[in-house]
Amino acid sequence: MGTALASSSMMSSSMMSSSIKSSEISLTDTLQAAMEKHYHSKSKNQLDSAASFKNSSWLATNPSLSFSFLQSQENYGSDEAEIRLNLPFKTNEQKNLEQQLVQGQDNSNSYTTAEVALHFSMLIRETLGAYQVDYLLMKKAVHKLSVLNKLEQKFQQRYNTNTVSLYPLLTIKKELLDAKIEQLEYQNKTESWLDRYLELTGLTILPKKLTEAPYVIDPQAIEKHPVIQSLDAAWQQQKNLLKATDTTLTPWHVSISAKKVDSPDFVDNQIGLAVDVPLSFTSNSSQATRTSYFNAMKEYQLARDQAGLTIQLGLKSALNELQLLQKQHAFLAESLKISQQIEQLTESMSSSNVLQHDVLLRRTLEAIEIQSSYALNQIKIQQLNSTLRQIAGIPL
């Protein structure tokens, strides 16, 4: 319905709307295009650059070099000169923790990208969904114009032969003007959505298929949601960062020294090795560190509970609304069949002048409205399915 855009005579002759066409691209292609235009070229490159930073696998910090010189104040004293290279080696615990931090950063970057993809999916879904609705309403206005034009010609002929008064003809002309205004309004809205689609994706083609796979209820939807996964990853990373300040992770310091003792009787050159091993067998975190940990934990738990509740309530509400629309759809289908029969009877009865003009006009417009309501309900069902997938954290 909404993808035969380029060939439609209802569309404006503007450059934007005439350049948008239907194609074999998928909804996933539109998401990738939006990500490439707005995210991958900037933000993701910065994340990848930060994640690619590598530090030493065996040194905890930069090595240091110290130099000392002691000069004796006695006539027969000795002078000493010493140079010392200090190497802070990581412990196995530090190495394991750093590996966890690197993996945590990679996970965090992945979840951030997933959240961004979900955000762009929302924007594309909103844009294409609104476009479908306004395009349908524009088609309804055009169909109404076609039907009313035929009625106008018919009643104009009757008026010219003095078969009817001027009143029914004026009534139809007024409905014609209202339909033209309606067409203009929804045509403008449709073009606005296409402008937004172009700005969002950079594409001049629409997906040929605008419907998504039906949403399947997943008991693990909350746990799989990118927002929840991102919060979990951020909390795990925060715990690792706080753990990095623990005194049990103090590095081992190895010092290599060279010393020269210069005295009147002899010169002694010495080389030595010293190892400084911390004796922290239990955690001895400061009160500030413990306070930071518990505050961060409370913030994480609160944010996770709120996000989980929002997802749960959103899914429940959308599912209830979807069930309602599906029930309505069955009634609308029956109503559509009846309206089509009435429309056929109205056409035959109008030729024989059996129906009064006001009844004829009302029945004609009602048939158009019912047809539009049926099609609109179909679109709303598709939109709710997309909404369910969006709430569940499923991107395009």
Image: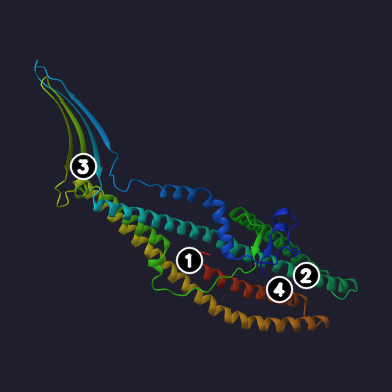
> Could you tell me how far apart the alpha carbons at marks 1 and 3 are, in whole angstroms?
50 Å
Q: Which residue is mark 4?
A: 365
Residue 120, visible in the rendered structure:
yes
- Under mark 3, the amino acid is His
Identify the secondary structure beneath mark 2.
Answer: helix
Which is closer to the viewer, label 3 or label 2? 3
Residue 184, position in %: x, y?
71, 59
Q: Do the numbered discs 4 and 3 sit on residues whose CB atoms are within 8 Å?
A: no
Q: Residue at x 62, y 54 (%)?
A: 202
Task: Give the mark, 4 or 3, whose residue is nearer the N terminus.
Answer: 3
Q: Quadrant of the N terminus?
A: bottom right
Say whether residue 50 is left or right of residue 260.
right
Up-down relation of residue 282 to residue 80 (above or below): below
Residue that label 2 marks: 146
Residue on which the image places disc 1: 394
Location of mark 3 (residue): 253
Q: Quadrant of residue 393?
A: bottom left
Would you say the residues marked 3 and 2 are in contact, meaning their CB atoms lie under 8 Å apart?
A: no
* Element carrying mark 3: strand
For discs 2 and 1, the disc positioned in front in the rendered view: 1
Considering only order in the chain, which callout, 1 or 2, is on the residue closer to the N terminus? 2
- Indicate which disc, 4 or 1, sits on the residue closer to the N terminus: 4
Q: Amino acid at mark 1?
A: Ile
Camera-nearest residue between 213 and 329: 213
Between marks 2 and 4, how big is the CA–CA gap?
12 Å
Q: Residue 33, located in which quarter of the rendered image? A: bottom right
Q: Is residue 12 left or right of residue 332?
A: right
For badge 2, the amino acid type reads: Ser
